[in-house]
Image: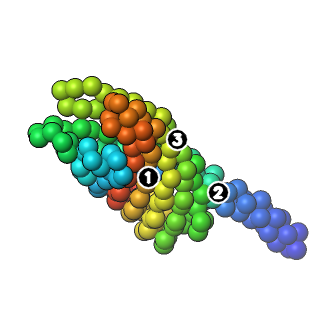
Amino acid sequence: MRAVIGAAVLGAACVAQPLAAQDRAGVFVEAPGGAAVPTFEIADYVSSGTAFGGTVGIRFGNWVTMAEFDYGMHDAERVDDVEISTQHYIAKVGYSLTGPRDRGWEAIVNLGGGVVTFDVEDGDSYTYPAINAGAKLSYHFNPTFAVVLSPQGDVAFSDDEEIGTSNAWVWPLTAGVRVSF
């Protein structure tokens, strides 16, 4: 009888470790919407506007890799009836300060890089290298579904002669849902 109990305990321990590791890994997608807010010099040329996007992430314990796209729609400040869109293509690495959660609050800080495109309606399009810093605050209702608040800061290293500044700061501030697999 002791051999059976010992084998059961050993078997449970062998199964529990891989199951715990699975809880700490996985793929998620996010669908956010909100605002794209320009600051500093670029705010002289474009106004705040609506933003939406998408994120695909992969968890590795507390570490998270993400590919994120944000699309912002802005009005030109110095020209009437001209719209400018910004497309943010950013790859990120994040770290969960609270650890992954099945239920409750989670806080992730992230850094990344990529490109931001400024597309002027009926005009030119300019793409510049960019860096990103931000956070994701989420509330997990269960292991599969969460709501997410995502303040991000993107700095595009732009051409002053093309868009009026050599460093365009645009902040996608979004909220949305996350589905984990």
Q: Is residue 116 visible?
A: no
Mark 2 is surrounded, within 10 Å at the Cα level, by few (under 14), some (14 to 19) or many (20 or more) other residues, namely some
Q: Nearer the viewer, residue 95 or 44?
A: 44
Residue 123 x/y as whole percent = 22, 26
Report, in whole angstroms, how far the alpha carbon at label 3 lies from the one at label 1. 11 Å
Mark 1 is surrounded, within 10 Å at the Cα level, by few (under 14), some (14 to 19) or many (20 or more) other residues, namely many
| Helix, strand or loop under label 1 | strand
Q: Residue at x 34, y 47 (%)?
A: 41
Residue 47 x/y as whole percent = 24, 49
Residue type (three-letter) at the residue carrying disc 1: Gly
Report, in whole angstroms, how far the alpha carbon at label 2 lies from the one at label 3. 22 Å
| Quadrant of the rendering where the N terminus is positioned | bottom right
Q: Residue at x 82, y 72 (%)?
A: 5
Q: Nearer the viewer, residue 58 or 94?
A: 94
The residue wearing badge 2 is 61
Of labels 2 and 3, earlier in sequence is 2
Q: Residue furthest left?
A: 81
The residue wearing badge 1 is 153
Residue type (three-letter) at the residue carrying disc 3: Gly
Q: Residue at x 39, y 62 (%)?
A: 149
Of labels 2 and 1, earlier in sequence is 2
Which is more foreground, mark 2 or mark 3?
3
Which is more foreground, mark 2 or mark 1?
1
Q: Residue at x 42, y 38 (%)?
A: 166
Is the residue 10 above or below the residue 180 in the image? below
Residue 20 x/y as whole percent = 67, 61
| Helix, strand or loop under label 3 | strand
Residue type (three-letter) at the residue carrying disc 2: Gly
Residue 175 x/y as whole percent = 34, 59
Mark 3 is surrounded, within 10 Å at the Cα level, by few (under 14), some (14 to 19) or many (20 or more) other residues, namely many
- The disc at residue 70 is none
The residue wearing badge 3 is 113
